[in-house]
Image: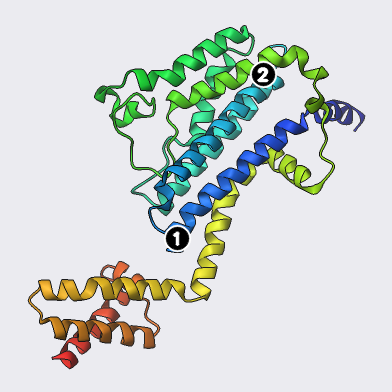
């Protein structure tokens, strides 16, 4: 026990609470960004909200903060050169988490899987950053600036194939739920590493280095920053699940499905040769009967060839006869 305690305590004291709190603050921004996506998905806000300039700016600011802190943390964790064992353990953890995110994204939305999101970028950028841990700060800064500038200075359709698009030098972006290509984003990691390396000699004399959170907001952000990877992995399933429960419990999902059906049904009916008045009456009948039977219009329409769709088809046939 004595040896374990002796080796663990210095590591705890070596942490810079301000770095943890900054990472926690960035994590808070990421939660806000993901909430905007979730609210739009459930129809609580405009579906275009995630693509608004302010939302996109928030996304880039949060990603930049995370990646710069990855570089800074890499420099602070390896002040005397790369510690291979510690680096390998951390890298394996990130790679495993990235693989988990990819697998989960395939399960949730196979049409937009996350193949190179922020965790994938952090993993590859960490490998590149490891080459600069012992290099002069100017070397990492120069390389980082070049990587940030590269996709803006030159791009080519030759980099659009799936095997190369992750580099960030292509002319198109893939359909994915999270996209942080290696260029320019790995450059932000190197810039963070360079700045931390340049400031290393003066860290001990800076007031913020010795800062310790005295109140709960600071402690909360610092705690979140210390456990950022775990929080990153669990926060979105929790948020999404909670919103789904709220939407389902309040009947909002059913109302949205009814409104969507009533908006789409009459035009489709008329396009197939139906009378305008008959179509409107039949569609309203379907919506009312489905609601009375506890049949979800959204689920039934998505249940291709299943029992729910058969029930909906029976309701449609009945209402079509009654509306004539």
| Residue at the spot 48% in from the left edge and 39% down from the top edge | 57
Say which residue label 2 marks.
196
State the image coordinates of residue 41 (x, y, percent, origin top left). 43, 58
**The N terminus is located in which quarter?**
top right
Q: Is residue 8 above or below residue 99?
A: above
- Between 4 and 230, which is closer to the camera in this rendering? 230
| Residue 99 visible at all | no
- Between 228 and 127, which is closer to the camera in this rendering? 228
Contact check, label 2 and label 1, Cβ < 8 Å:
no
Q: Looking at the image, is mark 2 or mark 1 nearer the viewer?
A: 1
Say which residue label 1 marks.
45
Crowding at dot 1, Cα within 10 Å, few <14 / some 14-19 / many 20+, comes out as some
| Residue 23 visible at all | yes
| Residue at the spot 44% in from the left edge and 57% down from the top edge | 40
Would you identify the image quadrant in which residue 291 lies? Answer: bottom left
The residue sitting at the right extreme is 2
| Residue at the spot 46% in from the left edge and 63% down from the top edge | 44
The residue sitting at the front extreme is 54
| Residue at the spot 20% in from the left edge and 82% down from the top edge | 280
Find the distance from the CA under tag 2 to the CA under tag 1.
40 Å
State the image coordinates of residue 322 (x, y, percent, origin top left). 18, 93
Q: Is residue 222 above or below residue 241?
A: above
Q: Is residue 314 left or right of residue 118?
A: left
Q: How is the image coloured?
A: rainbow
Q: Is residue 59 left or right of residue 277?
A: right
- Between 147 and 77, which is closer to the camera in this rendering? 147
**The C terminus is located in which quarter?**
bottom left
Question: Which of the two discs, 2 and 1, labels the residue nearer the N terminus?
Answer: 1
Classify mark 1: helix, strand or loop. Answer: loop
State the image coordinates of residue 304 (x, y, percent, origin top left). 27, 67
State the image coordinates of residue 242 (x, y, percent, origin top left). 57, 63
- Between 125 and 279, which is closer to the camera in this rendering? 279
């Amino acid at each position: 026990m004595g040896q374990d305690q002796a080796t663990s305590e210095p590591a705890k004291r070596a942490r810079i609470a301000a770095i943890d709190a900054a990472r926690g603050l960035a994590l808070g921004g990421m939660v806000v960004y993901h909430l905007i996506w979730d609210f739009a998905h459930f129809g609580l806000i405009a579906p275009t909200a995630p693509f608004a300039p302010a939302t996109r700016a928030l996304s880039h600011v949060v990603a930049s903060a995370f990646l710069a802190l990855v570089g800074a943390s890499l420099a602070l964790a390896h002040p005397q050169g790369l510690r291979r064992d510690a680096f390998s353990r951390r890298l394996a953890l990130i790679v495993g988490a990235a693989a988990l995110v990819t697998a989960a994204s395939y399960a949730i939305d196979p049409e937009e899987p996350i193949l190179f999101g922020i965790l994938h970028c952090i993993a590859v950028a960490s490998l590149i950053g490891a080459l600069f841990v012992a290099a002069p700060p100017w070397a990492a800064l120069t390389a980082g600036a070049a990587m940030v500038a590269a996709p803006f200075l030159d791009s080519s359709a030759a980099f659009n194939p799936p095997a190369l698009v992750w580099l960030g030098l292509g002319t198109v972006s893939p359909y994915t739920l999270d996209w942080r290509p290696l260029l320019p984003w790995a450059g932000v990691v190197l810039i963070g590493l360079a700045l931390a390396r340049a400031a290393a000699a003066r860290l001990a004399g800076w007031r913020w280095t010795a800062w310790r959170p005295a109140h709960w907001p600071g402690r909360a952000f610092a705690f979140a920053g210390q456990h950022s990877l775990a929080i990153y992995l669990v926060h979105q399933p929790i948020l999404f699940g909670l919103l789904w429960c709220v939407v389902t419990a309040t009947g909002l999902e059913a109302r949205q499905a009814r409104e969507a059906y009533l908006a789409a049904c009459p035009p489709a009916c008329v396009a197939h040769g139906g009378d305008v008045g008959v179509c409107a009456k039949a569609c309203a009948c379907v919506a009312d009967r489905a609601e009375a039977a506890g049949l979800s219009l959204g689920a039934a329409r998505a249940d291709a060839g299943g029992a729910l769709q058969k029930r909906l088809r029976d309701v449609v046939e009945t209402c079509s006869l009654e509306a004539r």
